[in-house]
Image (cartoon, grey):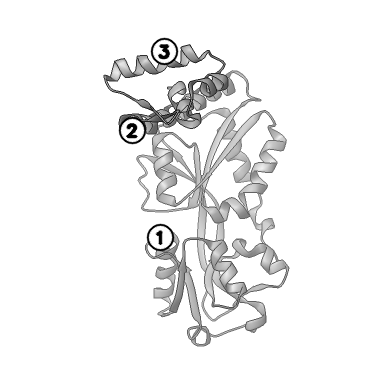
Amino acid sequence: MRSLALVAEHGSLQAAAGRCGLSPAAVHQHLKKLEAELQTRLYANRDGRLTLTEPGDLMLRFVSEILTQHEAALMTVRGWKDASRGLVRVGAGPSFSSSLLPTLVRRFRRRHPGVEVFVETGSSGHLLERLRMGALDLVFDIAASALDDTAYKQVALWRSQAAFIGRRASFPARCSLKRIEKEPFILFQKGSRMDTIVQGYLDQLNFRPKVAMRSDSAEAIKAMIRAGLGISVLFVWNINTELRSNVLTVLRTEAAPLELRMALIRSRCAYESQAVQEFVRLARQMNWQNLHPE
C-alpha cells in the first residue's frame, strides 16, 4: 500500500523506491501483488510517468487513510510503552486554529516535547466524521446538546461570548439595536453551524439584519469589517488582535451577548492514549479568559 501511494505521488518506481528504502524491483513486486489480489490494473505508463488507473485512484483513497491509521496505531503503542512519546491528533475550525489553539499546542509541546501534535482544520461536520473514523483523537467545537452521546462525549471547557463587531472608527462605544439594524451585515455561509447559531440569536432579538455578504471564513469577515464594509457577529476571542490595536470594537447594545460553551469532543469507542489524556487535562487547566483582552 505504501508503494502504491508513493508511486502515485512521484510517478516512478525509482523515486518511490528511494523514498521507502527499497529497490525499484521490490516496489514493482508490491504493485503486482496488489494487482493480482484485486485482479485489475492499478497503474499505467503514460508518457514516461506512472499514473494510477481509475481503480487505482479508488484504491488510493482507502490506502491513504489506512496508512494514516497505521502510523497512528504505531505512535499510540509507543506512547503506551513510553509516556514521554506518542501522538495527539486534534481537529478545530479555522478561527480556533488560528486564534487560541497555537497557545495550547505550544504549552503542551513545552511540557511533552516527545509527543507529536497533528492539527487538522475544517468544518464541524467534516471534523466529527474524521473523529468517528478514528482519524482524529479530539475535536474543538461549540458544545451541542444535539450531538449523539452514544458515539461522542463532550468535555466542557469554557464559556465564550459572541457579540456585534464593527470598525472602531465607524461606531460609538454604545449603539442601539435599531441603529445597527440599518447597517450592512457580513454573516457566515448559509447553513453552516455558526450561521445557524447566529441566526437563532438574531431571531431571539427579533433582529432582521440587512445581509450584504456571506463568508465561510472568520478571517475574511474580519477583513471586510476592517474595510468598513459592514458589521458582524463574531466570538470576542476571534478579534483579540484587532481589539488590542483599536481597529475593531465590540458594539455594546441593550441586548445581552450570545454566550456559548466550547468543548473538546472525543469518540466513546476510541482508545485514549496517555498523551491524549494529558492534552485534555492541559486544555481543561488553561485559563482561557486570560486570552481575551480586558
Give the quadrant of the C terminus.
Answer: bottom right
Secondary structure at badge 3 equals: helix
Mark 3 neighbour class, 10 Å CA radius: few under 14, some 14 to 19, many 20 or more: few
Secondary structure at badge 2 equals: helix
- Could you tell me how far apart the alpha carbons at marks 1 and 3 are, in whole angstroms? 47 Å
Q: Residue at x 54, y 53 (%)?
A: 94
Cβ–Cβ below 8 Å for labels 3 and 2? no
Q: In this view, does 216 lie to the left or right of 237?
A: left
Q: Which residue is disc 3 drawn over?
A: 29
Q: Which of marks 3 and 2 is in front?
A: 3
N-terminal-most mark, 1 or 3: 3
Q: From what the image shows, is residue 66 above or below residue 196? A: above
Q: Which residue is disc 2 drawn over?
A: 58
Q: What residue type is labelled 3?
A: Gln
Residue 82 visible in this rendered orientation of the protein: yes
Q: What residue type is labelled 1?
A: Ser
